[in-house]
Amino acid sequence: MCVCSAGTRPVPCQSETVGGNSNFQILLVRWIASRWLALSRFVPYTTVSRFHRRASSWLPYVGILFLVLLASAAGDEKHISIYSPVADYSLNVSDRDGREYVGLLEILEPLGTVTAKAEKDNWKLRFNSIEAQFTNGHNRSRIRGRDFELTTRFLMENGRGLVSLDSLTTLLPQFLGIPVVFHVNSRRLFISEAGTTYTAELSKSTPGKLVLNFSRPVNPSIATEPGKLRMSFVRDPLLASGSSMITFDDNAISSASFQESNGAAELTIAGNVPLLASFSNDGRTITVGPAPASSNTTTPSAPSPSPPSTAVLPNATPAAGPAPAVPVRHFIVMVDASHGGNERGAALSDKLAEKDVTLAFARRIRQELEARGIPALVLRDGDATLGLDERAAAVNTQRPAIYIAIHAANDGSGVRVYTAILPSDLTSHGPFLAWDGAQAPSLGMSQLTAAVITTELRKKVAARAMAAPLRPLNNITTPAIAIEIAVPSDEISKLTSLDFEGGISVAVADGVANMRSRLEEQP
Amino acid sequence: MIPRHLKIATGILLVAVLLMGFFLWRMRRREAQSETRLADKSAVAPPVAGPTEQVTLYLAVDDPGVVRPQAARIPLPGGRQQRAQELLRAVTTAYLQENSQHPIGPGAEVREVYIVDPGLAVIDLNAAFADGHRSGVLVEELTVASLVQTLAGNLPGINRVKILVDGKERPTLAGHADLSSVYDTGSVARMVEQLAAASP
């Protein structure tokens, strides 16, 4: 992974994606680029054979072709999403005989106790107390001792029983005893599920803000592109509410549309300016409005940063569109409530998870910063699952004056303020920075800020500043610190005490306020 | 009137029953103790025998949150890879002791250490090491620093260390300390110094 440098402020590359596939793509691109450079730049022209000169011209195209093939292979993967009162989950769908099939055991597993046994061509299934038998290549099956006709053939592969998606609406009620609703085109199956509905209302403020109220808490992944903000709901049984397309008479937000495809529902908000989504009301409300002006600091002679393709998280405000002619830097503090969603962090007690404590502290620190006239954003302002790369990409896109990650622990006592540890050997890649060493240009300022905040904290509690191998600190291009608030196990209730929370938050906010002028001087 | 010989026989039988009951109770207790010993997953002492050598183990101390060098004499085999394994097993054994100043979860073990030229050591921890590890930035940092520094301090030429869990890469040790990167021993040495300097 890498970040591209735009002047002195690097931002994520446009082609940046997260996951194992991206690593392979980057390695491939690096290899192709190195071969191309070796052939076309560094080898003296006179020694370059005709073959090499030809190779130097077609290698980049081969690389692009590889990437397109890889991307299309990943994009072709089909999913079915199943929503039930017990669990909401997604499964892979495979094509057989021109039809779409899914594993029956995998569908039933989250819904009850299920066992399956393959005997020659027969596949026996027991779901709770219901027994069924299917035969490979046949439509006829027996469920609860009675014959049942599948709409398409049952298939058995390596002991795995596959049924076509067409069969699900008639087959599943045999096991579950309740009807199911299947959105065939989008492959979304609702089992006794009322679904989540929403209302969209444009506030009268200037500029306008679109307030989306959901009937239940939601946790979409959010991606932005110039003029659009997409919210993808894979695990949420979101249903269209009324018209699938709503248009607004507003300068900033022009429309909101609902689509379903490949096991997911998507809400797309179109606008004429870069948009920002923020969560509130425990994930039941999402407010979409114009993003604050980007803090680009590119000089006119430097190339404009490419807008990032995705920022999969709440509150992400990627810079979109061309850089302003006269760059204006806004002082924003990004407070990150570490962990969240499925990733609970440390179990601080039987009932208290680290993710809840970090969120409470992050919100309180934002409040204290705002009370001092310092604009602040909470990166995870709800119970969303965010990967470390996603957090880093969001921060590098937003480019705040400082990033502060919050952690909590039940070992020891006091507050520890961390800065990143960087590899000793940071090889230069021209305009590119190594992902693991993206913090390098800002490390000095991070350490200074950590020291100032530690001094403020020491007025109230024991505090120390040190380095730690803690991601995403080393992936962040702006000054970045992490704060770990620790209390002994037998005093864990202190972590939720408003007085304690307030004391720490005030000290952190004071420290940032003291550093404001220095941080504003940052290029 | 019960005949005398019947009374004597009954008495003898009662005593025999009591003795057998006591014997059975002892047997069951011994068996339970034996099962407990078998179920004890704590790491066994280094299996290497032979002459001992003086080494420096870098052991984490939770309070005040530092990594301290500690001289120890442990039997070490000849090969670098085997020496690395025994060094880290000695560290793990120290953490599994009852009075450890940096306790780790039961069953924690260093499965293997591979020395990959040039200067790269790959530590493979078992799943119990990571799964049973306490979660927290400092507590995880101390463990990582202790393992890396012990290798770097005793095996000259080791300048990078990668940590795996059950042969696979994990993003973090227990939610915080990064395991996705390769540790630079120079950076870790500075981190250990900083921990000592920052300790209260």
Image: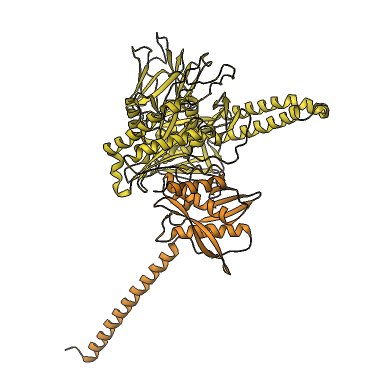
Chain colours: A yellow, B orange
Q: Is residue B162 above or below residue B19?
A: above
Any part of residue A233 in sight: no
Q: What residue lies at 57% left-to-right and 52% top-to-bottom?
A: B152
Residue B56, how many percent across, how many down?
Answer: 53, 59
Image check: A195 left or right of A295? left
Any part of residue A28 in sight: yes
Residue A462, how many percent across, how many down?
Answer: 35, 44
Q: Is residue A439 above or below residue A214?
A: below
Q: State how many labels appear.
A: 0
As drawn, the residue found furthest toward the top would be A249
Q: Nearer the viewer, residue A141 or A440?
A: A440
Q: Is residue B77 above or below residue A3?
A: below
Residue B178, how many percent across, how many down?
Answer: 50, 42
Q: What residue lies at 54% left-to-right and 65% top-to-bottom?
A: B74
As drawn, the residue found furthest toward the left would be B1
Q: Nearer the viewer, residue A40 or A313?
A: A40
Q: Quadrant of residue A377?
A: top left
